[in-house]
Amino acid sequence: MSTSEDRQARITDWLEEKRPDLASMYRAARELLASASEPGDERSRVSHICHSMREIMNRLPSALGIAGAASGGPRSSTHVRKLPALVARFPNLDLLQEVENVPVPRELAALLDELVRAAAAEDGRVAANVAALLTDDGNTNHPAVREWRDITDFFVKWAHLHDEQSDPESIPSDDDLRRWIDLAETLMDGIRAEFFDSLHAIEDLLAEANQLNGGGEVGG
């Protein structure tokens, strides 16, 4: 019977083959979770664990060569960085007017449109990549896709320090972390198994094709 340790070993070996730095991240997360934090370091320990898991989940599609994993266009952050300089060109602009429709300069409206489009495209690419990992038909509404994104959102939330010191009571416990990592591992191990099943099927087809080609050449 397969144990959680067996699953962790399978995932580590798989990541090592596909992208060693992700395997290193995975080992680091597991090692940190297995060790107790020093007093006062609880939040940073959680941050390091969640950062590692977030990187694994975000980079796995490209590591497996999933179509569409590349950004494919300007990132929303590129447009966001342009906003302060553009708004500064219109010192009389009041975006907090108490009216239903606030008039803005055409240039600013165009940039906001580009920002919204880029953000929507990014979100769509992320969903499509996850769906390609977890489904046969690319269904972005599949429950497994939603679960993957919920897990990723948890790791993203706790990978970063927030504007204010986190209340010690709000910091995820080791049991919380184990539960979320276990969910991630379950999905990743399923992807790994599906990948190897597909790979073996392709290898069998190629071997059969080679035999047929070889037989044809001999018969000719």
Image (cartoon, rainbow, N blue to C red):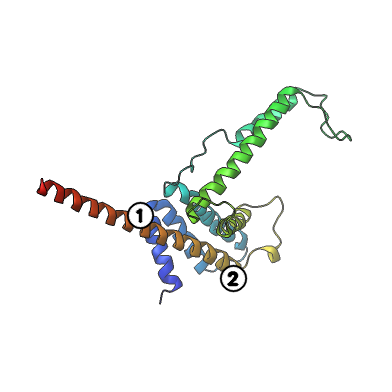
Check disc 1 and give the amino acid type: Glu
At which x and y percent is residue 19? 40, 51
Residue at mark 2: 175
Asked where in the image residue 152 lies, by quadrant, the reply is bottom right
User: Quick check: 138 left or right of 41?
Assistant: left
Q: Residue at x 49, y 65 (%)?
A: 186
Percent across and percent down for residue 182 are: 52, 66
Q: Residue furthest front?
A: 220
Q: Is residue 64 left or right of residue 164?
A: left
Classify 73 as above or below 157: above
Number of callouts in the render? 2
**Rendered location of residue 140, percent (x, y):** 57, 51
| 190 or 153, nearer to the observer | 190
- Residue position for label 1: 17
- Give residue 119's mark: none
Do tag 2 and tag 1 residues touch (Cβ < 8 Å)? no
Which residue appears farthest toward the right when viewing the image? 98
How many C-alpha atoms fall within 10 Å of the one at disc 2: few (<14), some, or many (≥20)? few
Question: Dot 2: what SS?
Answer: helix
Three-letter residue code for mark 2: Asp
Nearer to me, 39 or 132 = 132
**Residue 105 x %, y %:** 76, 23
